Amino acid sequence: MNGTLKKQQGMSLIEIMVALTISLVIILAILRAYVSLGYVSAETTRGASIDANIMKGLIVADRILQGVGYKMTVPTDSYGSTNDKLIQAYAGATAITVSDIDTTEADALVWKLSSGNCQALKSEGKSLIYYLGTGGAGYSCTTLALPSTTTPPPSQTLISTAATMPSTVHSDVGKISLKVTKLTGSHICTPFGVTNTTATATGGKYYVEVKANIYATSTSSTLSALSNSTCLFNVTT
C-alpha cells in the first residue's frame, strides 16, 4: 500500500472567510457611495425645482407690478390707504407710513385697480400670492385695505416652496419679502431698457423689490437671495 499523503488542494476555510469578509466590506462601501450619490442627486433636483419656481414667480410678479396705476387718475401723492391713493404697503396687518417705507420690509402691497376695487401682492411666509379678484377685476375695497382673510378673494399662487428644508440648508430658504422705495426730488425710475433723454421726461416715483431666499449656495447657517426690482412707472407722484 502506498502510504504517501497528498497535499490539500484549493482554499482553506480561513482563506474563504477572509475573502468573504473583504467582499462584504467592498459591497458595503459601494452601497454607501450609491446611497450618498442618490441623496445628493435628489437634493440637487429638489433645490433646482425650488429655485426654478422662485424665478418663474419673480418674472410673473414683475409683469403684474408693471401694470400698477395703469389708466388711473394720479393724485398729488399716490401713497396711502385712503380711497384717493394708488398704493399702500403693509408689514403684517399694519400699514407702513410713507416716511418708513424705505427702511421697513413689507409683506404686502395693495394697489387701486379701479374705483372701489383693489388688487394685492402678498407674501405669506414661503408663498407669494396675487389677489386678483373675480375675473381679474379686483376685490371690493373702500380704502386700500388688505384682502379679507375670512372670505379671501380669488387669488393665484405665484411662488410656493416647501415649508420645511433638510438640515443641510437654512430653514428660511423660500421665504419671500417685499420692499417699496420712494424716489425723492427729481429722481424717477423707468422700465428696463428705457432711458430718459430730456429733463422733462416723466417716470415712476416708486419701485418694488421682491426678494426670495434661494436654495442654491445656501447652507445650514447662511442664506443666498434672489431679487427683482420693478419700477411702478404709472405711479408718478
Image (cartoon, rainbow, N blue to C red):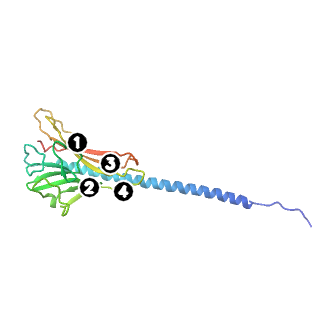
Instruction: Please name which of the two marks, 2 or 1, marks the residue nearer to the observer.
Output: 1
Q: Which residue is mark 3?
A: 213
Q: Quadrant of residue 146?
A: bottom left
The residue at which mark 2 appears reads as 124
Question: What whole-number distance in Å separates the C-alpha atoms at marks 4 and 2?
Answer: 15 Å
Tell me, for residue 103, which label it has, or none: 1
The alpha-carbon separation of the residues under discs 3 and 4 comes to: 13 Å
Q: Quadrant where the C terminus lies? A: top left
What's the amino acid at mark 2?
Answer: Glu
Q: Amino acid at mark 3?
A: Asn
Residue type (three-letter) at the residue carrying disc 1: Thr
Mark 4, residues whose alpha carbon is within 10 Å: few (<14), some, or many (≥20)? few
Relative to 97, say whether 35 is above or below.
below
What amino acid does circle 4 point to?
Thr
Q: How dense is the environment of label 2, judged by Cα within 10 Å: few (below 14), some, or many (20 and up)?
A: some
Residue at mark 4: 164
Marks 4 and 1 sit apart, C-alpha to C-alpha, by 29 Å
As helix, strand or loop, the secondary structure at mark 2 comes to loop
Q: Residue 113: where, in percent of width, then height?
A: 12, 53
